[in-house]
Amino acid sequence: MIIPFRKMHGLGNDFVVLDARRAPLPITPGRAAAIADRHTGIGCDQFIVMEPGTEGADVFMRIYNPDGSEAGACGNATRCVAELAMADSGSGAAAVRTISGLLPSERLPDGTIRVDMGEARLGWGEVPLAQEADTLHLPLSADGVSDPAACSMGNPHATFFVPDLAALDLPRIGPELEHAAIFPQRANIGFVQVLAPDHLRLAVWERGAGLTLACGSGACATLVNAARRGLSARAATVSLPGGDLRIEWRDDGHVLMAGPTATAFTGMIDLDAYPA
Ligand SMILES: N[C@@H](CCC[C@H](N)C(=O)O)C(=O)O
């Protein structure tokens, strides 16, 4: 089966996007992983399938990591898919549903897309953690980092506050922390340096993907955890290796994320060339 695909990215966090809104596509976790492979597939940080929207959504977005695991949230892909839905409808707003909830989005006057990522979930069972613990101070450490905070943005995140991001060996400690026993569903691991109360520098070791140039849900979780710790305001610029996101944790608990989207190229893919 030969179908069109679109390669998009938000700050270099890149996606292969397939459109299954008109007819279902034969996508399995293994096929998603094979297409995401940077050597033998198209290559991407996340493999995205657009499905028909339900219950107030313009589109349902299914998210696969390159290891084939399915994720409940992807902030950067939400902006990209919302932009496609807006282009289709000719409107400046779109609602994207994921397995974790409904995410209303809008185009801002500067052309960036802002998504309401929903409420940050702060309970230990919501992250989830393997046992009851204070999500503001997890009993977890690795070489050079300790005492993270955790929350869920529809997917699990832990945030380590560090004095110098550049001093860390992220490819070494990232996998160990992602797979720590305290995270029964593994976790995305953020490492943040507070530059000012309204400016955070972040790198994220993503669950199922490794280091990426940007993680939108990670930027949201980082702002929430920094504000809970009294280290930042409730609105800040989060600088990632791929660029900046503007994050706000509203008083009603919802987290807003604004940033750019881009299409790198489009093409055709033969799904049968990849194992089902
Ligand atoms: N890049 C994404 C997050 C993708 C999912 C994540 N790796 C997970 O498994 O939860 C983002 O922009 O939020």
Image (tube, rainbow, N blue to C red):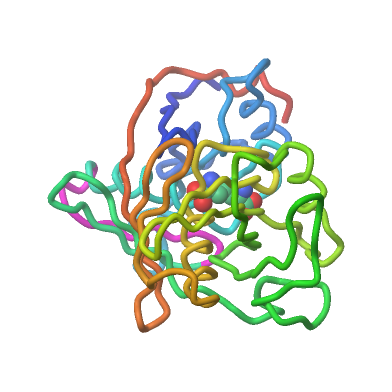
Give the residue displayed 82% in from the left and 73% down from the top. Answer: 130
Give the quadrant of the N terminus.
top right
- Residue nearest the viewer, comparing 43 with 207: 207
- Residue 151 in view here: yes
- Residue nearest the viewer, comparing 21 with 166: 166
Q: Residue furthest right?
A: 181
Q: Residue furthest left?
A: 109
Q: Position of residue 95 (x, y in %)?
A: 33, 60
- Residue nearest the viewer, comparing 166 with 79: 166
Q: Position of residue 260 (x, y in %)?
A: 31, 42
Q: What span is in magenta?
A: 88-100
Give the residue displayed 43% in from the left and 46% down from the top. Answer: 76
Q: Position of residue 168 (x, y in %)?
A: 69, 42
Q: Position of residue 107 (x, y in %)?
A: 21, 52
Tell me, yes or no, whether the highlighted magenta stretch contains residue 92: yes
Q: Is residue 204 left or right of residue 237?
A: right
- Residue nearest the viewer, comparing 71 with 178: 178
Residue 274's quadrant in the figure? top right
Residue 90 lies, with reference to residue 256, above or below; the image says above
